[in-house]
Amino acid sequence: MGLNNVDTEKLKQTIEAFTADPSKAKKVNTVEGEWSPGGGPQFSATVTFEGGTATLEADQPTGLGGGGSTPGAMIYCLYGSASCYAATFATFAAMVGGELQKMTLKAEAKVEKVAA
C-alpha cells in the first residue's frame, strides 16, 4: 500500500479512467434492510461491498424505545461521516506527498430536545 495506507497509484489510474469516461464514475450504493417487530436489534441489513458482505444491526437506545443492544442509527451516521472525512483527508495528503504520523477524529451529535 502507498503513503498513509492509500494506494495512490491505483487512485491515479481510477482518476484517469473517470476522466476518460465520466460514466465510469457513477456508482449506486444501496442499503435494504428489515425492521424486526419481535425483540433483538430493531433493524438489520446485509450489505454488499467489494470485499464481500456484512450484516449490520441497529438498535435505538433504551430511552428512545430500543433495547440498546447494538449501535443506533446516529452512531452509524457519525461513524460514516468521520471515516469518510478521515479517508478524504488521508487520501489528499498522500496525493501531495504528505505523510501522516497519526490522525484522530471526533464526531459528535448533540441532541438538545426530543419533541413529544
Image: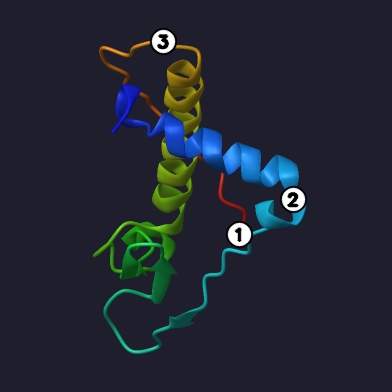
Residue at (45%, 57%) from the top-left corner? 73
Please tell me whether mark 1 or mark 3 is closer to you in this view: 3
- In the displayed structure image, the side of residue 114 where residue 104 appears, left or right: left
Asked if disc 3 and disc 2 are in contact, CB closer than 8 Å, the reply is: no
Q: Determine whether 45 is above or below 108 in the image.
A: below
Question: Residue 11's x, y, as percent?
Answer: 50, 36
Residue at (39%, 63%) from the top-left corner? 60
Question: Residue 92's x, y, as percent?
Answer: 51, 21
- In the displayed structure image, the side of residue 40 where residue 91 appears, left or right: right
* Type of amino acid at the residue the image marks with label 3: Gly
Q: Residue furthest bottom?
A: 38
Q: Which residue is mark 3?
A: 98
Q: CA distance from mark 1 to mark 2?
A: 51 Å
Question: Residue 110's x, y, as percent?
Answer: 49, 35
Residue at (41%, 38%) from the top-left corner? 83
* Type of amino acid at the residue the image marks with label 1: Ala
Secondary-structure class at tag 3: loop
Q: CA distance from mark 3 to mark 2?
A: 29 Å
Q: Nearer the viewer, residue 55 or 44?
A: 55
Which circle marks residue 21 in the picture? Answer: 2
Residue at (75%, 49%) from the top-left corner? 22
Where's the N terminus, which quadrant?
A: top left
Which circle marks residue 116 in the picture? Answer: 1
Disc 1 crowd rating (10 Å Cα; few below 14, some 14-19, many 20+) is: few
